[in-house]
Amino acid sequence: MKLDILAIGAHPDDVELGCGATIAKEIANGKKVGIIDLTRGELGTRGTAETRKEEAENAAKILGVSVRENLGFADGFFVNDKEHQLAIIKMIRKYQPEIVLCNAIDDRHIDHGKGSKLVSDACFLSGLIKIETSEDKKPQEPWRPKHVYHYIQWKHIEPDLVVDISEFIDVKMKAVMAYKTQFYNPDEKGPQTPISSKNFTDSINYRARDLGRLVGVEYAEGFTVERYVSVNSLFDIK
């Protein structure tokens, strides 16, 4: 299955938090989108790998993605090496996305920055013809995405581009809140974490609203880029 966009996150819920509304918007526009989670989030203070799996499946249905896979890397301990790069290269060649969305280049959780660099490196390596991979014993063709964009997470990072998500903020919030064990839930009696507070849940909305305000729309999601963004005309810029 060829995808238009492949969104990759270190943990189940990274994609929803970072670019869930952008994904929902592109799907509504007829694009095929898939999600790859690098880890099962098994080190999370709340919930388990099993509950996280169920929550990720529910969130995927809400967003309407075509496929969601989990690579089972070690939460907190995966590294940017040949083994991990090849696992991601196989996914890139399998789905042949035009665009890859991945973790923030720097963030509070160490896996986010690591995941960002790992995926970026794999996107480059995936285009090299002398790196041989296979799926179901069949050789895969080299494939390099045209664009790699990094969504913004916990830390405030100035975006290089923003997407108007005004009509899809509710879908994003519904997908985020599918992770019932992770985010604010007054009925959840487990230990409290920085992301389980009502303050954090509220911040998802008001940060998107503030970013939207800065570009003249109601809500927006921001991304950083790895190379210059080009347009055919100055009038293409909104």
Image (tube, rainbow, N blue to C red):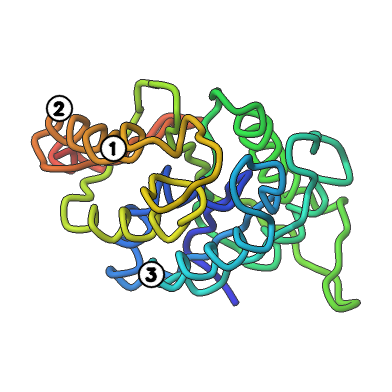
- Toward the viewer: 120 or 44? 44
Residue 224, relative to residue 16: is it above or below? above
Q: Picture coordinates of residue 231 (x, y %)? A: 28, 40
Label at residue 62: 3
Q: Picture coordinates of residue 151 (x, y %)? A: 44, 38
Real-space Cα separation, disc 1 to disc 3, in angstroms? 22 Å
Real-space Cα separation, disc 2 to disc 1, in angstroms? 10 Å
Residue topped by disc 2? 214
- Toward the viewer: 7 or 143? 7
2 vs 3, front mark: 3
Q: Are marks 2 and 1 in contact (CB under 8 Å)?
A: yes
Q: Residue at x 17, y 57 (%)?
A: 167
* Residue, far left: 216
Q: Amino acid at mark 2?
A: Leu
1 vs 3, front mark: 3
Going from N to C along the chain, the mark reached first, 2 or 3, is 3
Q: Picture coordinates of residue 24 (x, y %)? A: 33, 62
Q: Are marks 2 and 3 in contact (CB under 8 Å)?
A: no
Residue topped by disc 1? 162
Q: Are marks 1 and 3 in contact (CB under 8 Å)?
A: no
Q: Picture coordinates of residue 25 (x, y %)? A: 29, 61
Q: Quadrant of the C terminus?
A: top left
Q: Report helix, strand or loop for mark 3.
A: helix
